[in-house]
Image: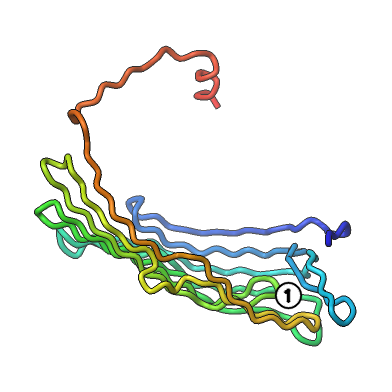
Amino acid sequence: MGNANLSPQINHDMELFYSYKKVFVFGVSYTKTVGVIAPVLIPMGTNQIISTYENLPGANLFYMYANVPYRFFKWWSVNFSGGYGFYNYNTTEKQTLTSNKTWSYLGQLDFSFNFNNNFMIELSTFSRGPYASGINQTKGVSVINVGAKKSFSNNKFVLSANVSDVFNSNSTKQTTNYKGVFIDAKNKVESRFITVGLNYSFGGKKEKTIHLKNDKVEEYEKRM
């Protein structure tokens, strides 16, 4: 059901970050939202539930984040990106859910191993803690991806293989307790894939670039 009485949602954002050598990034951000537009479920009678949108009173999001690359050895490098934050949604429901709030984390680690014989292995791990979103509480999830590739004949042949979501753990689990509506849901989409590929590069590595004369449209785009 639509809601013609929705008011605009207003966000107030503040952010402070520091970048070192355009690689290391550290920062904090804060967002205060007034009149959060959120999907809600409202019971109608004994066996009917209406799915619609309402303006929740407000929400606060505080987040600390970082991106840190590091090379242990010439052949082993790692990159971390993620952070830790506070989520808080205020609702109008006084009996069951007046404030939906959580501290939560989000992080990703990427490992890269480059060996001398044109062989490379990559390992990626992603993890997210439980967090609040509107009237829902979403549980955490962790995912691992792994891949490898090998080059032959002066990089003309490249054999690669990778597995996404090795343990098939990427699923969304949510609980809701709002205005007498109780929901415990799990949504699982196919996320584990095994891919094997063989690439062959025809021709030489030298490329010629032909630059056409700019027309007026390209000239105006550059000015913009």
Residue 60 higher or lower than 153, as above or below: below
Residue 70 x %, y % = 26, 62
Bin the neighbour count of mark 1 within 10 Å (Cα to Cα): few under 14, some 14-19, many 20 and up.
Answer: many
Quarter assignment of residue 74: bottom left
The structure residue drawn at horizontal position 78% and vertical position 67%, both measured from the top left corner, is 51
Residue 22 or residue 142, whichever sits in front: 142
From this viewpoint, which residue is outermost toward the bottom?
A: 95
Please say which color scheme the image uses. Answer: rainbow
The structure residue drawn at horizontal position 63% and vertical position 77%, both measured from the top left corner, is 185
Residue 5 or residue 16, whichever sits in front: 5
Q: Quadrant of the N terminus?
A: bottom right
The structure residue drawn at horizontal position 41% and vertical position 70%, both measured from the top left corner, is 143
Q: Is residue 72 left or right of residue 223?
A: left
Residue 191 higher or lower than 149, as above or below: below
Which amino acid does the dot numbered 1 rest on? Asn
Residue 184 higher or lower than 119, as above or below: below
Q: Which residue is mark 1?
A: 90
Residue 124 x %, y % = 33, 65
Q: How many marks?
A: 1
Q: Is residue 144 left or right of residue 57?
A: left
The structure residue drawn at horizontal position 67% and vertical position 65%, both measured from the top left corner, is 32
Residue 223 x %, y % = 53, 23
Q: Quadrant of the C terminus?
A: top right
Residue 114 or residue 56, whichever sits in front: 114
Residue 75 higher or lower than 62, as above or below: above
SS label for mark 1: strand
Residue 102 x %, y % = 59, 79
